[in-house]
Amino acid sequence: MDSLIAASARALAAGDVLGALKRVSLREDPPALALRGIAMAQLGEHPRARELLRRAARAFGAHEAVARARCVVAEAEVALAMRDLGGAPRTLAAASALLEAHADHANALQARLIAVRRLLLLGRLAEAATALAAIDTRGLPPSFAAVAELAAAELALRSLRTDDAAAALARALDAAHRSGVPALVAEAEEAHRALAQPAARRVSPDGEQALPLADVAALLQSGDLVVDACRHGVRAGAAWLPLARRPVLFTLARALAQAWPGDIDRNALIAAAFRTRRPDETHRARLRVEIGRLRTLVKDVAAIEATARGFHLHPHGGRAVVVLAPPVEGEQGALLALLADGAAWSTSALGLALATSQRTVQRALADLEAAGRVRGVGQARARRWVAAPLAGFTTILLLPSSLPAG
């Protein structure tokens, strides 16, 4: 390694990005290209950073497999920052294995942490938990420890294990301060604030109450019959009945729960479930069918009884009925929750994270843009979508594949 490359690398490690660039900005050899790519990434110029890292990877010779693998890891981190989630995870896994075989443990660990963070963004929480459990966090450098603990905290938050999340966040904050990396400190502090912020609203006959995550977890474990409009399901004690893929049944369940302890008029149920203000006999027949399906689904936790004017929800065991409503109402809640991280997302990445088609995402984004809640940046395939952070509450319960409290 020549003196300019070594000096540039030291400058980057110390956070002096411009100093690093001054030393290699006019050079086109592979190590200089790689350092320029990393520097541009730290400046937020992600497309340029990706281009430089790809050029560096191609320019390294066949005998420089470790250097190429390091470029693959750096490019994967840039892709993560760009919310480009469509890359092949096998390429990153192969680079990690090669680096581990050549005793480059730091970059191998970086690759594994990038893979965990990608899985979290995609909502593949079980896979993320398995991958994170395979990482030995003892004795890690502070910056790596902070990233690992932040991933552990997010997993705990999204499964409503708030005590575990608080402990992981305390460790993450300590490691971030020891690392001296301002971005890590800011990320850890923001995640810590999510614990105290309202995450949902409890809607009951007595009114509405904002709940932080710890209170949401306590409510779901209370034994009450909870119609969870954040994750679209019904909770009663240990029983969890997911209804995310059956929106009509969930709408009926929520309407019945909001009317409890009274009943609800048939026309009101039809209007809520079928979105019509002029019901006819076909709607009433369809309502009977859907109520029958819902009655069968919830028979172990509640009964749905017909009344003179409509239907009444009667939970077993004298349970109370509560509706847990999201902080943001509407079908675009999960989309807004993803965009609330401040990053610029492509429609393809949003489609992957939401497990839906790009066309569906594009329609939702068009509606949100018309309402002034999101904006597009760039043109054609380079177009990205951003939204202002949703202040005053945390959107953790709206993220895709959030787990029900166990």
Image: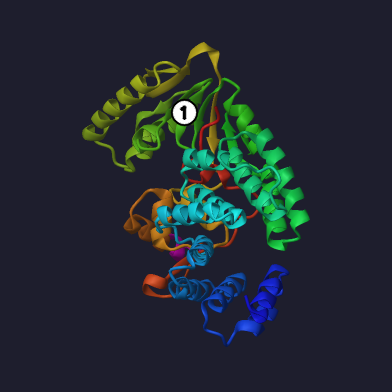
Q: Residue furthest front?
A: 63
Q: Nearer the viewer, residue 170 or 319?
A: 170
Q: Nearer the viewer, residue 301 or 147?
A: 147
Q: Is residue 206 visible?
A: no
Classify the position of the N terminus by image quarter: bottom right
Which quadrant would residue 222 be assigned to in this image? top right
Q: Is residue 44 above or below residue 81?
A: below
Q: Secondary structure at mark 1?
A: strand
Q: Position of residue 286 (x, y in %)?
A: 25, 31
Q: Nearer the viewer, residue 195 or 110?
A: 110
Please give the residue where the numbered disc 1 appears in the rendered image.
234
Which quadrant would residue 276 be assigned to in this image? top left
Q: Is residue 61 visible?
A: yes
Start and end of the magenta stretch?
367-372
Q: Position of residue 301 (x, y in %)?
A: 45, 17
Residue at 43% across, 69% down: 62
Q: Is residue 175 above or below residue 321?
A: below
Residue 321 placement, left or right of 212: left
Q: Is residue 304 above or below residue 16?
A: above
Residue 345 placement, left or right of 295: right
Q: Residue furthest left?
A: 282
Q: Residue furthest bottom?
A: 26
Which quadrant would residue 289 be assigned to in this image? top left
Q: Nearer the viewer, residue 254 or 129?
A: 129
Residue 155 placement, left or right of 284: right
**Does the segment drawn in magenta span residue 200?**
no
Residue type of the residue flagged with mark 1: Val
Residue 276 placement, left or right of 406: left
Q: Position of residue 383 (x, y in %)?
A: 42, 70
Q: Position of residue 406 (x, y in %)?
A: 55, 27
Q: Give the crowd class for mark 1: few <14, some 14-19, many >=20 residues within 10 Å.
A: many
**Does the segment drawn in magenta span residue 369?**
yes
